[in-house]
Amino acid sequence: MNNPTIDGLSRKALEQALLAMKRIYQAGYDQIIEAGGQCDTPEYMMAGDPTARELRALLDAPALARQDPVAIPDGYCIMPKRLTAENGAKALLLGEFKVEVTNECPDCGELDEPNEHCEICDGEGEYSQRHTISWDQIKFIYSKAVEGLRLKPHQGISGQEGLTFKYRDPASSEVRIVGLTKAEVEEGMQDTLHEKLTAQLCQCEPVGETNVADCNCNDYAAEFERVADQAGQRPPVTVILPDRKGPHEYRDASYTQTCMANEWNACIDAITYRWG
């Protein structure tokens, strides 16, 4: 399976970077970022009403988010477009993330005796050094996450002038697809959907030998059921970080601040996911 990357950073790494940086959700909302459903708190989850979700999907997502944080498409989170000192991101993130580099021990080869103890590597032949990831690196990773995971018009969430809806007859499994424009949605989505579906399904039969036709459009259309949008079936997610006891320490001993600059697995070891 291909795992597309953005400047060498995998999609998973980008999602994890956003998750590790989740504390800046509170630092100035001006961009909506896909985060695999791992949104910060329930108020940033999409409302469960499919009608509301599909209506909002036609709107300009970033502009809408600034007005109403609740109206975020399911599976997306709000994140600042850029990390700056002004929106508080630098104060929150600088010094938080570190990279551990393993080096060969330069002193082991110079020991006079084979069993002589090396104080640098304790006889292991290599030693590790921890370096704080620079602010430029943090901004680079974040910018790539924004670039790779933000809402795009072709995803059908924002920038689209229309939506499609799928209906299935539960008896025959016949499927019909109805398309609506943005204007039609704004005028009255449910009524327009029904009218368009009815027009597709209309069955007219002659009455006897007359020219009168009996059309069962409404009755036949009523049998069709909306096919649920898979994205709308995801349960809400709560992401819980371990409690902090200091600037860079956590009460949960299993949590580690050690993480590679391009792989953030170690940064979220102690994060708990609660579904439903």
Image (spheres, rainbow, N blue to C red):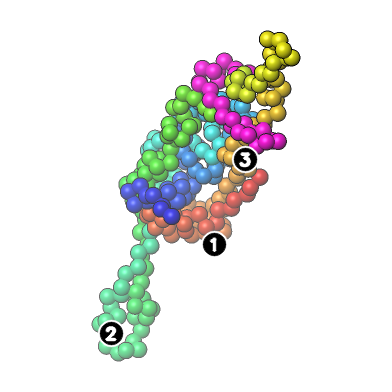
Q: Residues within 10 Å of mark 2 (few under 14, many from 20)?
A: few
Sequence-first disc among 1 and 2: 2
Indicate yes or no whether the magenta region holds residue 180: yes
Mark 2 and mark 3: Cα distance apart in space: 64 Å
Q: Is residue 117 left or right of residue 237?
A: left
User: Residue at image x 74%, y 14%?
Assistant: 208
Residue that badge 2 annotates: 111
- The label shown at residue 233 is 3
Q: Is residue 78 left or right of residue 111?
A: right
Q: Residue furthest top?
A: 211
Q: Which residues are magenta?
A: 165-192
Q: Nearer the viewer, mark 1 or mark 2?
A: 1
| Secondary structure under the numbered disc 2 in the rendered image | loop
Q: Nearer the viewer, mark 2 or mark 3?
A: 3
| Secondary structure under the numbered disc 1 in the rendered image | loop
Q: Nearer the viewer, mark 3 or mark 1?
A: 3
Task: Return the residue nearer the eye: 162 or 200.
Answer: 200
User: Residue at image x 30%, y 80%?
Assistant: 108
Amino acid under disc 3: Gln
Amino acid under disc 2: Leu
Residue 126 in sight: yes
Mark 1 and mark 2: Cα distance apart in space: 36 Å
